[in-house]
Image (cartoon, rainbow, N blue to C red):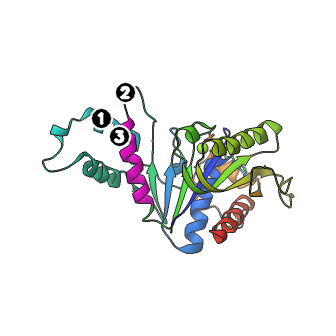
Amino acid sequence: MTLTLAVAGKGGVGKTTFAALAVRHLHESTKEVVLAVDADPNANLGTKLGTEPSRTLGGIREELLARSEEELPPGVSKQEHMDYQIRLAITEGSGFDLLTMGRQEGPGCYCYVNNLLRTIIDSLSTKYRYVVIDNEAGMEHLSRRTTRASDVLFVLCDRTKSSQSAARRISQLADEMKLQISRKALVFNSLDPGASGPPVSSLEGFHAVYGVRRSGMMLSRAEETESLADVPRTDPTFSDVAKAVESERLRG
Ligand SMILES: Nc1ncnc2c1ncn2[C@@H]1O[C@H](COP(=O)(O)OP(=O)(O)OP(=O)(O)O)[C@@H](O)[C@H]1O
Ligand SMILES: [Mg+2]
């Protein structure tokens, strides 16, 4: 069984940081190779994981659309060709495989190719024990249903009212869209270093609430390499992300 964790929330709230540390925690505690999916068109999950993507699925989709059936190698169906291309698009990192979605669709009819993509990603996901999806800010990815089947949706927020309202709207939209999400967890990010937990212990629409403290190292990394690959497990942000992910993993 695969456990899929998706990360959502408004802009700049810490989604990619959470996703990258979640990937690291899952690998380091289980030794499994984790599938990391960067679903943000402004991809930077790879950078935070200390690697760079080679190709994006958006790019592959464009190439496929531009290519007619006749141009494919003889005896190869479009699905087989795409399947092969996707395998080429996976970057192998240390403890994870990274799949970068890239730009979303432009003008033109993408339904056929999008459906193919979903089928392939769904079947690819089953080969991994853990999948972590980093989403773009806002809610569009919910409407586009890239987040459609997840075991846990982590919605990040900070202490501001606007960010918490955004988190609630994401939760409501996920319900309205009838997305297949088993659990929704609210995460307060960048809490004071002295905080002993999230400011509220429960919130309507969420099955759990977690708190993640901010850390000086996260801030300095953002200014320097950006890679979180060597952040120690004792870092307050990392240890809080690990705690939240572990608590959800053990339920799964
Ligand atoms: N717990 C934390 N402590 C300190 N800095 C943090 C923490 N979480 C995130 N940051 C910093 O906040 C900034 C935004 O983080 P991040 O890129 O993870 O957010 P995001 O939600 O993915 O943004 P976007 O919406 O642009 O994708 C980064 O500079 C990051 O280093
Ligand atoms: Mg991000």
Q: Say which residue appears at 72% left-offset and 58% top-offset.
A: 237
Q: Which mark is residue 113?
A: 3
Q: Do residues under tags 3 and 1 come within 8 Å of each other at their CB atoms?
A: yes
Q: Badge 3, how many Cα within 10 Å: few under 14, some, many 20+?
A: some
- Position of residue 174 relative to residue 202, above or below, is above
Q: Which mark is residue 108?
A: 2
Q: Position of residue 210 (x, y in %)?
A: 76, 58
Three-letter residue code for mark 2 = Gly
Based on the picture, tell me whether residue 121 belongs to the magenta stretch.
yes
Earlier in the chain: of badge 3 and badge 1, it is 1
Q: Do residues under tags 2 and 1 come within 8 Å of each other at their CB atoms?
A: yes
Q: Do residues under tags 2 and 3 come within 8 Å of each other at their CB atoms?
A: no
Q: Say which residue appears at 15% left-offset and 38% top-offset.
A: 70
Q: To which residue does mark 1 refer?
A: 65
Q: Badge 2, how many Cα within 10 Å: few under 14, some, many 20+?
A: few
Considering every residue shown, the one lying at the far top of the view is 107
Q: Which mark is residue 5?
A: none
Based on the picture, tell me whether residue 250 belongs to the magenta stretch.
no
